[in-house]
Structures are given as C-alpha cells and as structure tokens.
Image (cartoon, helix red, strand yellow):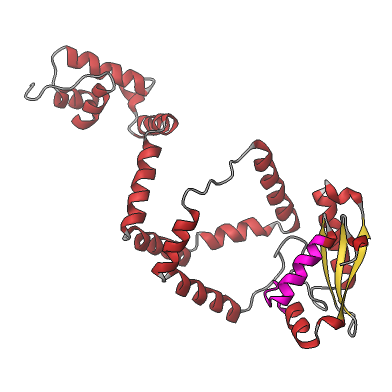
Amino acid sequence: MPVWLKGPGVYGIRRLASGQIYVGISKDVRARLHQHLRSLLANKHHSPRLQNAWNRHGRADFTFVLLERNPEFLSDVEKRREREQFRIDKFDSFKRGFNARPKADSMLGHEWSDAQNEARKRSNKEAWADESLRAKLSVKFKGYRRGKWTSASHAKVSDTLKHRHAENPEWRRNAQKWLHSPENEAKRIASMRSALQRPEVRAARVQQMRRASESPKKITAIRQTYFKKFNRESLGFNSPEEVDQACLRLYREGKSCRSIGRILEMDHKGVTSRLRRFGVSPERGRR
C-alpha cells in the first residue's frame, strides 16, 4: 500500500474497467485500505457487490485512490460524515457503485426486500435455537463490562436522534407505531415468556428485580406512587412518611395491625411492613 495514502481523508476502491467505485473515509486511509484488502481476500467484505466484482474480475482490475485529504477529519465527526456523503452522492456509489449504504455511517434509506428480511429472520431463529451457541456466547461475554453512560454520551445520542428526526419528521412516529403494534407486542410477550422458562434466565431476572427493589430511589418512587394511587391525602396525610408515623403511633396505643388497617384503609400486611421500617416486629394475637 503506498505510503502517501497514510493520514486522514476520503478514499475510493475503483474498478478500472467500469469506473464503479466504493467510497469510504478514515483517520488513516492506508490502514483502512489494508482492512478492506484483508476482508476481500478472505471473501468476507461487508459490501456484497464489491466482493462479487472482486471475485469475478480479480485484484488486477481494482485500484485504491485518495479522493480528498483534510486534517479536520481527525477531530470533526460531522465534517467527516459530510465529506463522505458528498463523495457518495457525487459518484452515486450506492446505486451505481459498491457502497452498501446510501447514507454515510447509516443504513437510513436502505430498503430490505421481503426475501432478505425472511432470510435474516430464519437465520437468527436457527442460530439462537442452538443451545451450544448460547453457552459459548455466555462464556465469552461473562464479566464483560459495558460502557458507562456519561453526559457527553447522552448528548451525542440526543444529537443523533435530533438529526435523524430532522431528516424524516415521521421517523419517530412510525417507529413508535411499529413497536407498539399488536403483533409486535404479542411477539415480545411470547419471547419473554419463552426466555423465562430457562432456569438461568429466570434466576438472573429474579436477581435483577431484587437489586432494583432495594434501590432507595426505586423504593421512594414506589411509595409515592402508592400514596397517590390510594389517595392517602383524603385521610389527612401529606406524605408516605406521615402514614408510617401514624401506624407506629396507633400500634404503640395497643391496636393490632388489622385494626390499624381498618382505620387507615389499608391491608394489614401494609401496616406490618411500615412498622418494620422502624424495627418493630408486630406481636401475634394482639386484638
């Protein structure tokens, strides 16, 4: 690979006979073209059209070209995307060339055929039905730490969604409509029930729910929700904590959990749980 290709820029993989081209962009063009070359020689390139042309005509019919060099590509993501999109549109490399996507860094605008969708669905189902595959993936990703969300990552995702919505205002509405359609809701419920029948999934889900239930924020939110749901304000209380104090006071006056529940219009188990928040274990047999 020529040394002069090293550095940031927009590059192309051009077929000499037809002039068809694949357009890409990278902070290091030379290294990225090496990756393309390895994928093509291994018959695993992500662009089927480029791979098929490479297999049919051979390496001698292709050349690597530097279309544009700009040091701003090192830091400005939007600039990189803009210049790559400019070259894709200029050469019409999606419809007439080898690019697999019509938009830079996005599958937006690409329409999958019914046959492709069915093939992907069938392939995914066959793969995930294999218990050995699931076991291998479980071992592979066990202990894998996912990246943590930061204010910068949240802002980046927000900007991306705003950009997508600006390009197609109906995108969000259509996505919500599709996600909450009756058939998708039924599929989601069926898949969750099927997954929970597996002991390892059920155990992991139980542990996850227990950890969530022990979260102080979660507990506070649930207590506030139930306070409003059962309209405790109508009894003269302003917060869940005041209800707790009332239960403790009535219990110390000698009333049982059931009688306290009748007074405060709640189940006796709810009274018991409130008393235990103060470290009080209710006595059995009290009337």
Residue 165 in view (yes/no): yes
Q: Is residue 46 magenta?
A: yes
Q: Is residue 83 left or right of residue 147?
A: right
Quadrant in the picture for the N terminus: bottom right
Q: Is residue 227 above or below residue 123?
A: above
The residue lying toward the viewer, choosing from 268 and 198, is 198
Q: Is residue 75 above or below residue 33?
A: above
Residue occupying image coordinates x 15% and y 27%: 258
x then y, percent, for residue 167: 75, 57
Q: Is residue 18 above or below residue 235?
A: below
Q: Is residue 246 left or right of residue 28?
A: left
The residue lying toward the viewer, choosing from 70 and 39, is 39
Residue occupying image coordinates x 71% and y 71%: 39
Q: Is residue 195 left or right of residue 121?
A: left
Q: Is residue 170 magenta?
A: no
Q: Is residue 234 above or below residue 105?
A: above
Q: How many marks?
A: 0
| Quadrant assignment, res 23 | bottom right
Residue occupying image coordinates x 56% and y 57%: 176
x then y, percent, for residue 256: 13, 21
x then y, percent, for residue 165: 70, 54
The magenta-colored residue range is 31-48
Q: Is residue 117 left or right of residue 43?
A: left
Quadrant in the picture for the C terminus: top left
x then y, percent, for residue 136: 45, 63
Residue occupying image coordinates x 71% and y 50%: 160
Q: Main secondary structure of the magenta part?
A: helix
Residue 267 in view (yes/no): no
| Quadrant assignment, res 32 | bottom right
